[in-house]
Image (cartoon, rainbow, N blue to C red):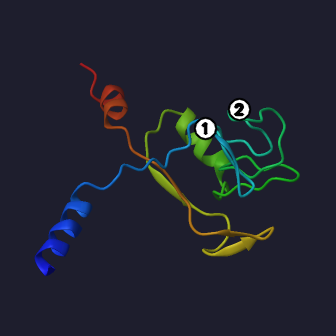
């Protein structure tokens, strides 16, 4: 009996049912816009579009918060527009595990990776 139970358990683990966890059409979850844009209080995709009160990754607004710290954004923009190719990382605007408007913000990070192809084309021209 033990062998049969072990065999059934092994088969159940190897052939588990598939599960899907992706959002197909965006939405507003926990006051956060999951819709492939970066603006607060606006939904580009989902069941509800247009002006919607929500938080998002970057651009803050009157009733929505930005998750990523956007301090020194003007500096980063000017350096990138000048053609300098560099990488940087930004963390969440508030400390880890902060409660913002009754919602727990766990963690967030944004990173811009150095693009070697752009750097090479600017500096290694024949």
Determine whether, in the image, residue 120 is placed left or right of residue 14: right
Viewport quadrant of the C terminus: top left
Specify the farthest residue to the bottom: 2
Q: Are marks 1 and 2 in contact (CB under 8 Å)?
A: yes
Residue that label 1 marks? 36
**Which element is circle 1 on?**
loop
Count of numbered circles on the image:
2
Residue at figure coordinates x 28%, y 22% from the top left: 125
Determine whether, in the image, residue 49 is placed left or right of residue 34: right
Determine whether, in the image, residue 34 is placed left or right of residue 55: left
Residue at figure coordinates x 73%, y 46% from the top left: 59
Circle number at residue 44: 2
Q: Position of residue 113 (x, y in %)?
A: 41, 46
Residue at figure coordinates x 71%, y 32% from the top left: 44
**Which element is circle 2 on?**
loop
Specify the farthest residue to the right: 62
Q: Nearer the viewer, residue 5 or 121?
A: 5
Q: Nearer the viewer, residue 40 or 13?
A: 13
Question: Residue 118: which quarter of the image?
Answer: top left
Say few, some or many: other residues with alpha carbon within 10 Å of mark 1 (under 14 / 14 to 19 / 20 or more).
some
Could you tell which of marks 1 and 2 lies nearer the N-terminus? 1
């Amino acid at each position: 009996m033990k062998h049969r139970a072990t065999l059934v358990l092994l088969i159940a683990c190897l052939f588990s049912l598939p599960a899907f966890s992706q959002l197909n059409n965006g939405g507003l979850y926990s006051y956060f816009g999951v819709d492939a844009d970066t603006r607060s209080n606006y939904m580009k995709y989902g069941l509800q579009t247009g002006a919607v009160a929500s938080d998002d990754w970057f651009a803050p607004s009157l009733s929505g918060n930005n998750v990523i710290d956007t301090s020194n954004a003007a500096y980063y923009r000017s350096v990138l527009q000048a053609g300098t190719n560099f990488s940087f990382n930004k963390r969440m605007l508030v400390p880890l595990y902060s409660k913002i408007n009754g919602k727990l913000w766990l963690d967030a990070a944004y990173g811009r990776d150095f693009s070697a192809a752009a750097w090479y084309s600017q500096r290694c021209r024949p």
